[in-house]
Amino acid sequence: MNLTLKIWRQAGPKATGEMVTYPVSGISEDMSFLEMLDVLNEQLNARGEEPIAFDSDCREGICGMCGLMISGKAHGPEVTTTCQLHMRSFSDGDEITIEPWRADAFPVIKDLVVDRSSFDRIIQAGGFISANTGSAPEAHSVPVPKPKADRSFMAAACIGCGACVAACPNASGMLFLGAKITHLGELPQGQPERDARVVNMLTQHDDEGFGGCTNIGECSSACPKEIPLDVINQLNKDLRHALAHGE
Amino acid sequence: MTDLHSDTIAPEAPEAPATDSPEAPAPDTLVHGLYREGEPIVDTKAPRGPIAERWNTRKFEAALVNPANRRKLTVIIVGTGLAGGAAAATLGEAGYNVKSFCYQDSPRRAHSIAAQGGINAAKNYKEDGDSTFRLFYDTVKGGDYRSRESNVYRLAEVSANIIDQCVAQGVPFAREYGGLLDNRSFGGVQVSRTFYARGQTGQQLLIGAYQALERQVAAGTVEMFARHEMLEVVIVDGKARGIIARDLVTGEIETHLADAVVLASGGYGNVFFLSTNAMGSNVTATWRAHRKGAHFANPCYTQIHPTCIPVAGEHQSKLTLMSESLRNDGRIWVPKNAADCEKDPRQIPEEDRDYYLERIYPSFGNLVPRDIASRQAKNVCDEGRGVGPKVGDFRRGVYLDFTDALKRMSAEAVAEKYGNLLDMYQRITGENPYEVPMRIYPAVHYTMGGLWVDYDLQSTIPGLFVTGEANFSDHGANRLGASALMQGLADGYFVLPNTIRDYLAKGPFPKLEESHEAVVEARASVDARVQKLLSINGDRSVDSFHKELGNIMWEYCGMERSEEGLLKAIDLIRGLRDEFWRNVKVLGAADTLNQSLEKAGRVADFLELGELMCIDALHRRESCGGHFRAESQTEDGEALRHDDEYAYVAAWEWGGQDGAPTLHKEDLVYEFVEMKQRSYK
C-alpha cells in the first residue's frame, strides 16, 4: 500500500518542531507500524536525511517504551501498543499523522521521543512496598483472597507507556497513579504504607505538572492493557481515607 | 586475514586433558588457524564439602563490611533487569552507594519484562516430590551436563527465598481460591514448581524489582542513570574501577568511577538480528569488558525456542515468542507431501499430515525439550515441507493446530487457558487461530554463554562482577523453561550481595581522579570510536550490516552447525566486519540523541562476537543442549555428547584486534549427578 505520513520533526528539546510530509510506498499489511517507520528511516538514511527518532524496545507490547499519537489517537486505531499495531489496520492511500505524546509532564526530547521520567518520580514517592531483601516471611504465611489478588494483578498490568496521559484532555496521570494505588492497596502487604502512599504519590503527580481527572475516560479507552477507570475511584477513595486518618 | 579455504583443515587439535599441560600445544600453534590453547582454569572458588553446605560456607567465609563503611563504597551496576535491578535495590538497602545504568528511558523497561511463563522455585507446595535437590538435578540434566554442580545447587537453594521476597514486595502471583499461591508445570520436569502471573510473570517480577530500586533512589542510596549506555570499562592497576558511558540524550561521554562494577546487561541473542530480544538488547557492555581481559565462556550456547511466530517478510524487525505451554494442547504437523504446502491446511486430510514429533518421539510427542522441537522443525522445512510464505527459497513454518483441543475442550475453555496468546497471534498475523492452524517456527531466544565468572560471580577482572544472562550462568548448554527469571533474581537479590562484600571489604580502594592515565585513555578510546563511526559516511545502513550478520549466524551458527559451515561463516564475518568499518553510513551528530549511532556501536561489537561464537562452535566437536554439531549425532540423528573430551567450560581470552583468542578450559566435575545421554523416544 501507499501512504502519506505527516510526522513531527523536532531537532531537540528547545528546538521548534514542525510536521513534515513523507510519502511511503510498497508497505505490506503484515508490517507492524514501527516496521513501516523502519522502512522510511532506511530510505531517509539512504538519501542522506537523518532518520526519525522514536522509542521502542521489546516490540511485543509489554515494555511500554513505544508510544505515538497516530492520527490523533494514542497508539492508533486499535486497543494495543504502537509496536503491536499492524498496517492491516490502515488502507491504501491513507494519510496518517504521527506525533509524540503531548503533555507538559512529558517534554519532547527529539522528534517522537519524549521524557517520561516523571512517572519514575511518582513511583519514587511511594509506589512500592518497603520490604528489604531477606526480610520477607514465608510466602504462604499471608493468604490473599483470590478476588483481591486478581484485581491487584489487573491493575499491575500497567506498562507505564503514558498513553493515558496523552489521551487525556487534561494530561492527567491519574489512571497510571490509580493503577499503582490499586495494585498495592488490594494486597495485605500493601496496607502499612497505604495512607502515606496515596498522599505522597498524588502530591508528586501534581508537582510534575499532570492535570486533574474530570471523569472523561479517554485514558481507559486508550490504555493498551485496558486498565479500567475504576482505579481512579479507588485512588479517590484511598485519598479520602488517608485524609480522614490525618495523613 | 587468514585464508580459511586454501588449506585442508588441520587435523583435530590434540585435545589434551586440561591437567596434562605438558602435552598442550606450543603457545603459538593455532588450532584450525584460529585460536590457541592456554592454561586451564583450576579454581572456581567454590567451597568443597557436602553440596548442601557450600553456599552457607561461602557466605560465612566471605568478609563483612561494617555498615558505617558501606557508605564509603560505590558500586556501578549496568542494566536494570531482574539481575541488575534486584542487585541495585539490595545493595542500596544495605547502605552502599549505587550508580545504576540503563539504556532505556526507565529502568522498568528492561527486557526481563517480556518473560511470559513463570519462575521455578523448590517450594514443594504441591507435595509432589519436589525438593532443592530435585530442582538442582533437573537443571543440571536440562543443561545437558555442561553446568557447574555447586552453582546450580545454590540456585535451587535460594529459589524459595525469591518467592518469599517477591510476595512481600507485592508481586501479584496467581492464587488459588483459598488464597494460597498456584503452581503450574513446565517443560522438561515432572513436578509443578512454576509460580506465575498469567502470561506476564517477567513483567510482574521486574516491576517488583523496579519499585524496590525506585525506593532506594528516593532514599538516596541509588543514583539512576537512564538513557545511558556503557561503552567502556575503566581498569586501573588490574581492577575494574569504573565505566565510560554515553548520555544518549545529550551525547556527552561521561566517566563514572567506583570501587566495583557489576554487569547485568543481558544476553546477546541480537547477534542473529532476528530474535525474541528487545531492539536495544546488545553485547556491548560485556564485549567491552571481554576486550579488556574478561574471559567469555561458552559463547556458542544459544537457545532457539520452538514456538515463535514465523518471519513474515524482509521487513521483519523482531520475532515474537509464544509460550511453550501451547504445546500442551496444540499438535504440531506439516504436510506429508511438499505439493500440499500451499494448500489451505483445513483441506489437507488427516492421512496426508505428518505429526512428526509424535511420530519420531512417541513417548514425549509434542512435549520434547526446546532444542529437539526446534531442530526437527528445521529438518522438515529443509525437506521442503514447511508452510506459510516463502522467505528466500524455503517456507519456514510448521502448523501448531488447536483443532483437536477445540473439539475436546470447547472454544471457551481454550480461550480461558490460552486466550491472550491466541489474541497476540491474531494481532500479529491477521489469522484467527480458532479457525486456521497457527504457524510457528523456532527463533533465537536466550544465550546460555556469557562472561566467565567464578562462584562469587566475579569475572577474570578483579572487581568486575557479572550477573543474570550476561554471565555464562548456571544453565549449561540448555536452559529449562522458567529458569531465567529464577537465575536473574537469585543473582541479584541473594548471591551477588553476599559475594561482592568479600571484595568490597578490601576497599575503599585508592581514590581515583578522572585525570588518571587509564581513565583518560578509556575515555579517549570511546570518543575516537564515536567519531570514527560518524566519519565513515559510506553507502550502507547499520541495519543492513546487522541483517547480513544475522543471516550468516542463523545459517551457519544456528540450529545446526558443521565444520565446513562455521569456517565459511568466520570468513564471511571477517569480510563483513572489514566492510562495516569502511562503508557504514551513520548520519547525525555525536552531541544529540542519535539512534543510528547507538545501533552502529552495538553492531560493531556483534561483528566481533559473531566470530568468537563460530570459533567456539567449531572447537566443540560434540552436540550438547542447544549446540548441535552435524558431525556428532547418533544413527537416529539425535545429539551426541562426548563427555570424555568436552566436559568443560570453554573460557575464551581476547587475543587482540587482529590476534587469535586463547581457550582456557575449566573441567566440569560431577560428584552428585551421574552424566547420562538424554532420550525422549
Image (cartoon, coloured by chain):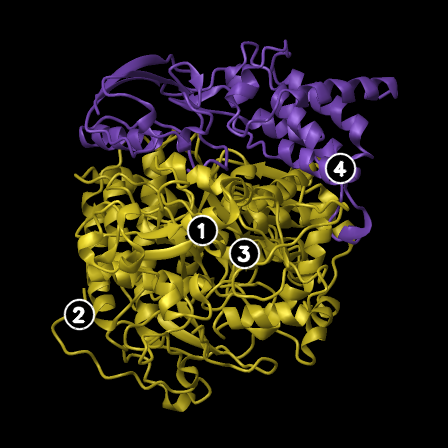
Chain colours: A purple, B yellow
Amino acid at dot 1: Ala
Amino acid at dot 4: Leu
The crowding category of the residue bearing disc 1, from other C-alpha atoms within 10 Å (few below 14, some 14 to 19, many at least 20), is: many
Measured in 3D between alpha carbons, the distance from the residue under mark 2 to the one under mark 4, in whole angstroms, is 63 Å
Q: Which residue is mark 3?
A: B484
Residue B657 can be seen, yes or no: no
The earlier-in-sequence mark between 3 and 1 is: 1
What label does residue B285 carry, if any? 1
Q: Which residue is mark 4?
A: A187
Measured in 3D between alpha carbons, the distance from the residue under mark 2 to the one under mark 3, in whole angstroms, is 37 Å
What is the x, y in percent for residue A178?
A: 67, 24
Q: Is disc 2 in contact with disc 4, using a CB cutoff of under 8 Å?
A: no
**B81 with respect to B552 (left or right):** right
Measured in 3D between alpha carbons, the distance from the residue under mark 4 to the one under mark 1, in whole angstroms, is 38 Å
What is the x, y in percent for residue B520?
A: 44, 47
Q: Marks 2 and 4: which is nearer the front?
A: 4
Chain designation of label 3? B
Residue at position x 34%, y 29% in the image: A33
Q: Which residue is mark 2?
A: B4
Measured in 3D between alpha carbons, the distance from the residue under mark 3 to the one under mark 1, in whole angstroms, is 20 Å
Q: Secondary structure at mark 3?
A: helix
Measured in 3D between alpha carbons, the distance from the residue under mark 2 to the one under mark 1, in whole angstroms, is 30 Å
What label does residue B416 carry, if any? none
What is the x, y in percent for residue B230?
A: 46, 45
